[in-house]
Every structure is written in structure tokens, then in C-alpha cells.
Image (cartoon, rainbow, N blue to C red):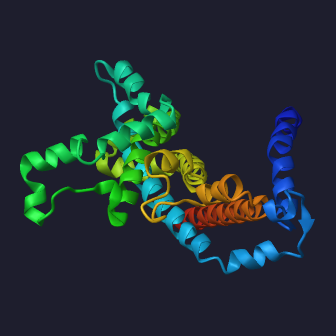
Amino acid sequence: MIQLLLLPAALLIALIFGIPLLRYLWLSFHADSVITSLVAIPNNGANWFRLFNDQRFWQDTYQTARFAFVSVSLEIFLALGIALLLDQRWRGRGVVRAITLLPWALPTTVMALGWRWIFNTPNGPIEQFAKLIGLQHLYGLQDLNILANPSLTWLATVVGDVWKTTPFVALILLAGLQTIPNDLYEAFDLEGGKPCAGLFKITLPLLQPYLLLGLLFRLAQAFGVFDLIQVMTGGGPASSTESLALYAYLNAMRFLDFGYSATVMIASFLLLVFICLFGWLVIHQTKHFREVVK
């Protein structure tokens, strides 16, 4: 009965995502650019041969995976602490819960503009604070130039993403914490269990489905990051922060090569599916191993 009730929503999602996906897949085997007068012509998989030999694609794949791994890891860790804090009973908790969601409620473009100003050289707050404490003189620099340094710029984008989306993960984990009965903690206390042990023996095991949900949601969003990178850095400096979504966008809108852009998007989708399945299998096998050991 439940499956029948979910059928309309499943069909709607299949239409919304399935049709464009099939269109991209079809287009990835065609040449569709200014060279062909924007007419799709079959090219016998030439786009895919080009993709496998495209160093910029592999560089962007590494940069996107690095960004996703670091940002999502930090978000899960911070969100867990925030959710545990907001789950406690204390005065003003409702107000703090509402304030916590503000970064997530802000449009990504507005937030990215704010972080670009924060990291701006020479007038951004971080540069001004560094000058105040003499950090530049300590390292013999005139300015930090965070957004112009390839080794630092990607960390700036991670900071912006973590600040923006940690509340979303915290909301998911907080919902999970609300489902855990207090009787379990009371019984654990009566048996002489310590609060720290309760976290690992009760909270985290029962919170695992919500952790997995938050992980998969954020991994999919981080792997497809576009607007944050486009506004904060434009993919620079020297393409050091360029993501796969931005690379696909540039091929389509700047170079008018829609066939190759579709190929990049399909490859990104396949990589994301593989990463999510791998993560799910690792967590599932870890859970199964713990059950066997017990």
C-alpha cells in the first residue's frame, strides 16, 4: 500500500530527472557546437575519447572530490556537535535553533558574495586583522592575497560551504536525536554508564541512518557545487578551484560546445553515483561487522 502511495512522487521525480539525464546521455555521443552550427551530429563517442585524455577534466575531478571530502567531513563533525547541543534542554534553545538555520536560509549567491568580501585584498576583514596583528610581516608578505593563492583559495571556498550548509546537516541529525527514546539513556545511567560511553553505545548507532542521509545529501550537493565557486573565485586562480559543474558550464555557455558539456555532466553523475554507492557499502559493511562481533 505504501509503495502505491509513493508511486506518483516516484514517477514525477523520474520525469524531472530522468528525461534531462537521458537527453544529456544522448547528447554526449553527438557533436553539437559552433563547428556543427549547433546541430547535433553523431560522432561515434569522440566526446568520451576526448574526456579520457582531457587533463583539465581530471584536474577538476580531483579538485571537486577534494572540496567535497573536506567540506562534508567538517560539516558532519560540526553538525553532530551542534545537534547534540540543540537537543539539550536549556533556556533560549528555540531562539538559538532559529538563528542556527539562518546561514542555510540565505541564498548561496548572497552568501558567496559576503565571503568574497571577507577574504578580499586589501580591504577584507581577514586582511585587516592580519595587518593588525602583523601576520604579513611575520611571513615577509605585503598582503595575504588568500583569493589569489591557489593553495589557500580552495580552503576559502571550503570555509564558505561549511558555514552555509552545516545547519542543514545539523537539522537532519537533530531530527534523528528527537527519535531516540530517553528511556534508553535512563536505563544506561542506572547501569552505571558514563555520558561519553552513551554517545558511542546509544546515540551514534541509532543516529547512523540520519548520518548516512546527511552524508549522501551533502556529498551530492558538494560534488555538484557551482554557484559558490562561480561567485567567490570564478574557478581561479589559474583554474585551481574550478569544479566539474563549472567546467561543464564553461564548455556550454562560453565555448558553445554542448556535446562535450553533456559528456562532462554525465561523467560527473556517474562518478557521484559510484562514490555514493561506495560510501553506502562501506557504512553498511561496517554496521554488519559490528553486529557479527557482538
Q: Is residue 102 above or below residue 180?
A: above
Where's residue 258, x and y in %? 77, 58
Depth check, front residue: 77 or 209: 77
Q: Is residue 198 left or right of residue 105?
A: left
Depth check, front residue: 85 or 45: 45
Residue 171 visible to an observer of this rendering: no
Depth check, front residue: 186 or 102: 102
Residue at left offset 70%, top offset 64%: 264
Residue at left offset 59%, top offset 55%: 246
Q: Is residue 17 left or right of residue 200?
A: right
Where's residue 289, x and y in %? 56, 69
Q: Is residue 184 left or right of residue 4?
A: left
* Quadrant location, the N terminus: top right
Where's residue 115, x and y in %? 36, 41
Residue 137 visible to an observer of this rendering: yes
Residue extending furthest right?
42
Q: Is residue 220 above or below residue 123?
A: below
Where's residue 129, x and y in %? 15, 44
Residue at left offset 49%, top offset 64%: 239
Depth check, front residue: 259 or 94: 259
The image quadrant of residue 113 is top left
* Number of numbered discs on residues: 0
Residue at left offset 61%, top offset 62%: 284
Q: Is residue 161 above or below residue 1?
A: below
